[in-house]
Every structure is written in C-alpha cells, then in structure tokens.
C-alpha cells in the first residue's frame, strides 16, 4: 500500500501553490454550487408551485447533479456570485493563501472590475493586506491584476445594478419581506371599483375594511400554522403537504381540485383583463392580443422554467403599489363629490335587493386579500431567516393592513372620477372608463399597470395549470404518447382557457368582474377562511414546532367558529338566494355541503385530537444547534432524554439542551409519561447547511404493557405516524 505524502517535493520547493490551488478549486466549486442553490431557491418561490412535483423538481435536479458529479443545472455568472456573496462567505476559510488562490481562479474564469464586486471582495478578504501579500507571493504580481481595466458597457452596468438591487431586496428583514409579498395588487384591484359601484363607494369601503380585518386574523392563523410545521419549514412550500398532515388526505384532494379551478379561473381573468385593456390603449382587437398571450405562455412552458426570482417578484409587487397610487392621484384630479356620495344599499330607504350587485361586491372584495397560499409558498424561505416565526406572522398581518389602505384609496379615487352608473356597466376593467374620463395618459399608464400587475401572473398560472395537469397525466397509460404527446395533453387546459376567453371576447359575454366574483365566493371562502381556521385548530394540537410568539386570541373557539360559519353561510347564501344561474347554484351548494361533511368526518375520525411529536434534528446550518424536541398538544414538554454513543451515555433536557456530537449518536431513549395524545409522530432528520431536510435513517422501538409489549417500526423517509393509547411507555430511536 502506497501512502501519498502530505507535501510533495514540488509543493515544498514552490511554497505549496499546487496544494493551495487544489483547495481553492474546491472552494470555488463550493461557492458556485451554493450560489446556484440559492438562485434556484429564489426561482422556486417565484414560480408559485401549486403541486408537489413542481415544488420539488428544481431542488431535486440540483441535488441529483451534485450527487452524481454532473454539471450544475446552469452556470452562475459573476453577478450571481456577487449577489449571494454574503450567504456563501461562511464557506471561505481564514487562510490568506487559499483566499488569494480563489481570487486568482475567479480572475481566470470571469471578467469583472474592482468596483462592481464589493461583496466578493469582502467575502474573500481581498482588501486585506494578508491576502494581497499572499497573492504577490504565490503569483509574482499584484492582486489588482485579476481586475479588468476594460470599460464596462452600459448594458453590463445595468446588469450589475440589478444584481446589487436584487441582493438588497432578497436580504430584506423577514418582516418586510412577508409584508411586501402579502400585498396582492393586480387583477382584482382593477375589478374592485366596478364591484362597489352597485352599492356606492362609501358602503363598499366599509365592506373592504370589515372583510380585510377578518383576513388579518385568518392570515395570522395561516402564518402560525406554517411556523408550526416542519414539513413546510424544512421541505417545499406546497400547501397540500400541510393539509394532508393536519387534516387528512381527503381534505388534500379537495384542495387540489380547488387549486386547479383557481388556476383555470384566474388564468381566464388574466386573458380577459390584459387583452381588453390593451385593446382600449391600442385599438387592436382583444382577440388578437389573446393569441399573443397564448404564445408567451407557450414560450415559457417550452423553456421548462420561468427563471423569475424572488427579487423580481418583490420589484413587481412594489411597482404595482406605486402604479396604483399614481393612477389614484390622476383620478383624484377629476374627483366629483356627487359620485362618491352615491349610496344604493339594499333595503335602505326602500332600495330593492339586487343579488348580482351583492355577489360582485362580496366576491371581489374577498379576492383582494387572497394571499394566504403565498404564506405557505414563501414559508420555507422566510422561516430560515426568522425561525421563531414572530416577525413573519406580524409581517403577513401588516401586509393585509397595507392592502386595505391601498385598495380603499383606489376605490375612492376611481369612484369619485367616474359615475357609478358607468362603472357598473363595465364588462372589462375599471381602466376603460377611467381612460375615457381622463384621456390617453391614463390609457398608457393603465396599460403599463396591467402588463406589470398581470403579465407575470399570466405566465405563473400558465405554468401552474400546466404542472397540475402534467402531474395527473404523467402515468404509464400516457407513456406511449411520448414526451411531446404528454406535453400537448398537459397544455390542453391552457388551450381551453384561451378558447373560452376568445369566445367571451367575441360574443361580449365575458365579465371580468363576474369571473373574479365567482372565484372569490367559491375559492376564497375556502382558501382565506375555512382552511386557515381548520389548519390552525389542527396545528395547535398536532404541530411539531412551537412559534416564538403565540397569539392566544387566535385560538378562541368563538372567533374561529364564527369565521368558519360565516364562510359556509356565504357559500349557502349565494347558492340558495343570490345566484340565479343553475350551474353556480349547484356548484356553491356542493362546495358548502362538501365542506360541512368533511369537517364532520374529520371530527369523527379524531383529526383534531392531540398529537405527541418527537423530533430528532441534526442541524448543520450556521449558528444552529442539534436538538431533541418533544411537543404535545402543540406545546413543548420538558422531558429527559438519554443519548447513547459507542462508549458512553449522556442525558439531555428536550427542547432546550443541544446535542454536542450528533454524528456519533447511536440512539436516543425517552421514558414518556401518561399522555392525552392519541397519535405519535416521530421525525429524525438532518438539516443541511442550505437549510433543507434529509431523512436520518432510523428505527423506532416502543416498549409498553400488553397486549403488544414491543413495537418496532422503521422511519420511512425519516418519519412515522401511528396511533397510541396514551399509556406510559419507553421509546428508543436507533440511528443507522
């Protein structure tokens, strides 16, 4: 057996540049891998994955490439390295030779100036005297030689500025990120003035505020639920996982149907809203614009990825808020008090009951606060920065408050500028009568607002609907069709949306506001009211983690029951009284009865019974400790844990003490007292430095009294859930 010398003769004679270069090469590869992972994570959040396969695809492609030694899904640019420099800096060792060699390799591979990369300079310590001297010693020339002296083109200057801006935005504190991402300004805001026109602006503002306050409660409930879930925190931001874990597979199946209907309906709204607005601004028929929109969606689907990032999502969100305020200021210049003072509330002063007016009002107002699914989608990213979840919960709640203020300003501005009778007759967006009142300036700004606010959404929901369809048709039965045939089959729902939108535009039967109102009643009653309430109740009994801040009033039974019954009553009220169309009535009644039936079935099956959770976590991320956590009924339980190693055994207090040597751990043993829980969940996972979870191979042994003294189970995928009787027992988790 030959033993390779630690230092070769050549390395000793040359000051070890060869060994240093090897180490620097490994460091540069690690930096590029980390950058690609962070960029992929940013792109995943912007894609709004509404299926588990879509949520996992990019992440799995990255991990497989690393594991198999293949090339990365894409090569990062020097701007990407600069953008995430603060987050890969932990990889850099405090060794001037390696830092200098890494800088040399960067200079060989990329082209950059000293001024454009302050983050990389700081991460590698290039401005320190030690690294400069090391570079001079290794390569016989100054470190400044890695920088180019060529003039940076104006296009590259723009790219560098965007990279710096994107880096700042993505590193915003979790409170501000959650707040900005919760404010949804777009298609629904354009329909809002039309929806309130039937009753008048002032009564409409009251409805906006009341429904907004209810949504502040339900989004806080959803944020707390996400904070309690290890599946979301360490997994993918797919809402189906949390619903299946806390409410059962039947509820998850209902959610999948709701998400598919939501994607279909909202995509139809985008086709109608964008095309009719562009028709008003350009004179080109809406039907022609729809063909262009279909081709844009097809282009991104054939690319396989949207390549939008979290930073782009933030910029578009902020731009939408700014544009809405600018349009409001323009409209206020044409303000007429008599328009604002118009009131047409049913039964007030003998006014007749108009079911269509009330339906439009309630449905559209519910839609402007439909950000609850975004809490789950952005949950993994936000909770990495705020593990306790306190800032995330506050940020989402304040975001709904900001949405209330912006939409109230918008309604008052438009309703004051355009007569309510004119607004109420609109089939398209409220920008059409505004342009007729104000002139071309409003038309141009309105077109920009529509493109910015709905353009990304059109592509996102085209991809989401395609992925939902592809997940269903990707079976052995369709394998004979080949990849192209499966693609066309998955693309067919988007073709159906396109044809339906063309027919509506051609016949003049499509109501932009009407579709949004129906989506608001059916989908948002479930997504912003019923599901958040049920999930909060379940998570406070079954959650794996305990948030840093818990608002006890959110769990008040009267409050939660009231919101639940209000949403169900809303569905029944529309199905039995307001809606006249048989299809709408049948759909609303079916959803209401199905919701009630599922809830009763969940109660009878014991879905809301307390759960005992044992979590064994080897946390390798920066600044975190490996722990054993024990929770019962959503609360931390102080329990003594025995940690077994090859040659000794130590004791640890669950939920507070840290595991000192997780790599050498062979088993943990707990003596559990009598419990009220009737379900046990055991998790064993390793949290990688990038914050994702991998299963920790383990086997569970439970020692208890008769009739089955010993129960042994493997932890499939790092976890197992099983019913228990609540009696005292000894539990051992043996680690591989």
Image (cartoon, helix red, strand yellow):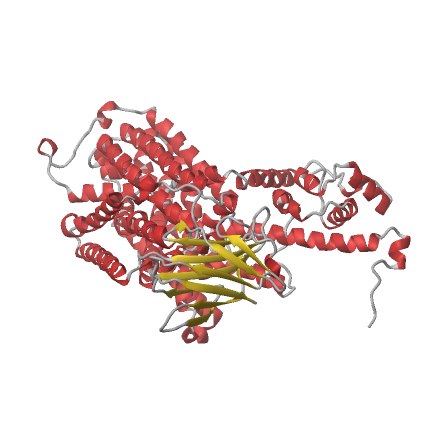
Q: Residue at x 91, y 53 (%)?
A: 13
**Left or right: where 453 falls relative to 364:** right
Between 685 and 300, the one lying in front of the other is: 685
* Left or right placement of residue 133 versus residue 113 in this view: right
Dividing the picture into quarters, in which one does residue 67 lie?
bottom right
The quadrant of the image that shows the N terminus is bottom right
Give the percent coordinates (x, y) of residue 370. 34, 45
Check the image and report above or below for 368 versus 294.
above
Can you give x and y, in whole percent of width and height, for residue 556 in the image?
28, 43
Picture quadrant of residue 437: top left
Across and down, in percent, residue 651 comes to 54, 55
Quick one: quadrant of the C terminus? Answer: bottom right
Which quadrant would residue 583 be assigned to in this image? bottom left
Above or below residue 556? Residue 690 is below
Left or right? Give the position of 149 relative to 171.
Answer: right
The structure residue drawn at horizontal position 47% and vertical position 53%, both measured from the top left corner, is: 629
Q: How far across and down, in percent of the image, does residue 291 sit?
A: 40, 53
479 and 682: which is toward the camera: 682
């Amino acid at each position: 057996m030959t033993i390779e010398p630690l230092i070769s003769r050549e390395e000793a004679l040359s000051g070890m540049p060869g060994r240093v270069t090897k180490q620097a090469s490994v460091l540069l590869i690690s930096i590029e891998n980390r950058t690609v992972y962070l960029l992929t994570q940013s792109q995943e959040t912007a894609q709004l994955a509404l299926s588990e396969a879509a949520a996992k695809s990019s992440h799995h492609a990255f991990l497989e490439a690393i594991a198999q030694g293949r090339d990365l899904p894409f090569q990062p640019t020097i701007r990407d390295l600069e953008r995430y420099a603060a987050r890969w800096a932990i990889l850099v060792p405090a060794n001037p030779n390696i830092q200098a060699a890494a800088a040399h390799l960067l200079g060989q591979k990329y082209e950059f100036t000293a001024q454009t990369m302050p983050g990389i300079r700081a991460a590698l310590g290039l401005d320190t005297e030690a690294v400069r001297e090391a570079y001079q010693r290794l390569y016989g020339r100054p470190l400044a030689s890695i920088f180019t002296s060529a003039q940076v083109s104006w296009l590259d200057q723009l790219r560098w500025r965007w990279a710096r801006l994107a880096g700042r935005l993505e590193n915003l504190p979790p409170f501000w990120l959650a707040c900005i991402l919760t404010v949804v300004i777009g298609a629904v805001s354009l329909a809002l003035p039309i929806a309130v026109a039937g009753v008048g602006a002032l009564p409409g503002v009251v409805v906006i505020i009341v429904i907004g306050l209810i949504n502040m409660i339900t989004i806080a409930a959803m944020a707390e639920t996400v904070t309690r879930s290890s599946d979301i925190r360490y997994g993918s931001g797919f809402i189906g996982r949390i619903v299946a874990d806390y409410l059962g597979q039947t509820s998850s199946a209902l959610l999948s149907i709701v998400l598919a209907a939501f994607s279909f309906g909202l995509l139809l709204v985008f086709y109608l809203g964008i095309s009719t607005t562009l028709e008003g601004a350009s004179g080109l028929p809406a039907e022609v614009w729809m063909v262009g929109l279909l081709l844009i969606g097809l282009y991104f689907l054939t690319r396989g990825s949207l390549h939008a990032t979290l930073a782009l999502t933030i910029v578009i969100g902020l731009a939408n808020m700014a544009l809405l305020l600018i349009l409001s200021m323009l409209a206020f210049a044409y303000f007429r008090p008599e328009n604002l003072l118009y009131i047409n509330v049913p039964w007030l002063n003998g006014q007749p009951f108009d079911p269509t007016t009330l339906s439009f009002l309630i449905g559209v107002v519910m839609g402007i606060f439909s950000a609850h699914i975004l809490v789950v989608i952005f949950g993994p990213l936000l909770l990495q920065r705020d593990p306790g979840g306190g800032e995330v919960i506050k940020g989402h709640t304040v975001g709904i408050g900001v949405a209330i203020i912006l939409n109230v300003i918008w309604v008052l501005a438009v309703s004051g500028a355009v007569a309510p009778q004119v607004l109420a007759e609109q089939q398209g967006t409220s920008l059409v009568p505004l342009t007729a009142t104000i002139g071309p300036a409003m038309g141009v700004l309105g077109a920009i607002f529509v493109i910015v606010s709905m353009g990304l959404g059109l592509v996102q929901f085209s991809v989401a609907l395609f992925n939902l369809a592809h997940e269903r048709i990707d079976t052995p039965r369709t394998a004979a069709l080949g990849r192209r045939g499966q693609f066309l089959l998955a693309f067919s729902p988007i073709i159906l949306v396109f044809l339906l939108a063309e027919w509506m535009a051609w016949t003049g039967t499509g109501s932009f506001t009407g579709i949004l109102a129906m989506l608001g009643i059916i989908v948002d009653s479930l997504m912003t009211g019923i599901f958040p309430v049920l999930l909060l109740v379940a998570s406070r009994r079954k959650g794996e983690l305990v948030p840093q801040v818990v608002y006890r009033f959110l769990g008040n039974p009267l409050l939660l029951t009231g919101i639940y019954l209000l949403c169900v009553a809303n569905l029944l009220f529309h199905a039995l009284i307001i809606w006249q169309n048989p299809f709408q009535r049948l759909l609303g009644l079916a959803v209401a009865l199905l919701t009630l039936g599922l809830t009763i079935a969940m109660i009878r099956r014991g879905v809301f019974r307390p759960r005992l959770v044992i979590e064994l976590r080897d946390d390798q991320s920066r600044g975190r400790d490996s722990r054993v956590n024990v929770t019962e009924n959503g609360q931390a339980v102080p329990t003594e844990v025995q940690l077994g190693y090859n040659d000794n055994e130590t004791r640890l207090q669950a939920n507070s003490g840290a595991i000192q040597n997780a790599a050498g751990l062979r088993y943990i043993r707990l003596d559990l007292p009598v419990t009220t829980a009737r379900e046990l969940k055991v998790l064993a996972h390793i949290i990688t430095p990038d914050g994702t979870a991998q299963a920790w191979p383990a086997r569970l042994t439970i020692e208890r009294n008769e009739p089955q003294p010993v129960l042994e189970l493997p932890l499939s995928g790092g976890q197992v859930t099983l019913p228990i009787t609540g009696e005292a027992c000894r539990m051992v988790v043996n680690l591989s």
